Amino acid sequence: MNYNVFTAITILGFCCRFTNFLKDFNAEHMPQDAFTIKFIAAELKEKLLGGKISKITQPEKDMLAFIIYTACGSVKLEICLSAKQCRVNVAKTETPAPKVAPAFCMLLRKHLQNARIADIVQIDGERIV
């Protein structure tokens, strides 16, 4: 069964306000309106569509990291659900994972590992991807 990473996370109860889409951690903050999210979703779709989720880690309590194999190579997608730094970004650096995965991370692995990303869409006029 094919899962969309963001749809699966939303189904599991995570609705995240996306503050910005960062190329790296030093980028300026972007507005978090639905108009901006539309372009973020389009860029993520361009990079990740058809990719295979190969590894899922939870380096921090409020952060998820996905390693996704795409036609262009391996991409690391980070989703941070922190109240102050809520973001989705493609990262170049490695974040160390804990030795024992938390229960939520294990649940995501069960349902999403080795799945292909079928689509990335923004819910009409909302800040949910």
Image (tube, helix red, strand yellow):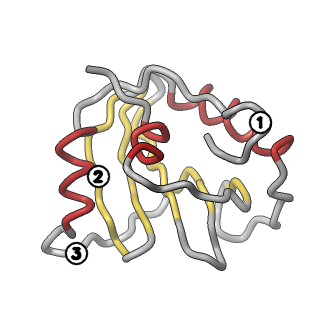
- Label 3 and label 1: CA atoms lie apart by 33 Å
Mark 3: amino acid: Pro
x, y percent for residue 42: 70, 30
Q: Quick one: label 3 or label 2, which is nearer the N terminus?
A: 2
Helix, strand or loop at mark 3:
loop
Q: Quadrant of the N terminus?
A: top left
Q: Nearer the viewer, mark 1 or mark 2?
A: 1
Q: Amino acid at mark 2?
A: Ile
Task: Identify the amino acid type marked 1.
Answer: Lys
- Direction from residue 102 to residue 30 in the image, left or right: right
Q: From mark 1 to mark 2, how far is it between C-alphas? A: 25 Å
Picture coordinates of residue 118, whole percent (x, y): 44, 20
Residue 84 located left or right of residue 98: right
Answer few, some or many: residues within 10 Å of disc 2's Cα (few below 14, many 20 plus, some between 14 and 19).
many
Q: Callout 3: few (<14), some (14-19), or many (20+) C-alpha neighbours within 10 Å?
A: few
Q: Quadrant of residue 128?
A: top right
Q: Look at the numbered discs 1 and 2 and tell me whether their residues touch, using CB distance below 8 Å.
A: no
Q: Quadrant of residue 43?
A: top right
Distance, label 3 to label 2, CA atoms, is 12 Å
Task: Note whether 71 is above or below 107 in the view shown.
Answer: above
Residue for badge 3: 98
**In what element is the residue under mark 2?**
strand
The numbered mark at residue 38 is 1
Instruction: Identify the residue at horizontal 72%, vertical 62% (top origin).
Output: 19
Provide the residue designation for mark 2.
56
Of the numbered discs 3 and 1, the one sitting upstream in the chain is: 1
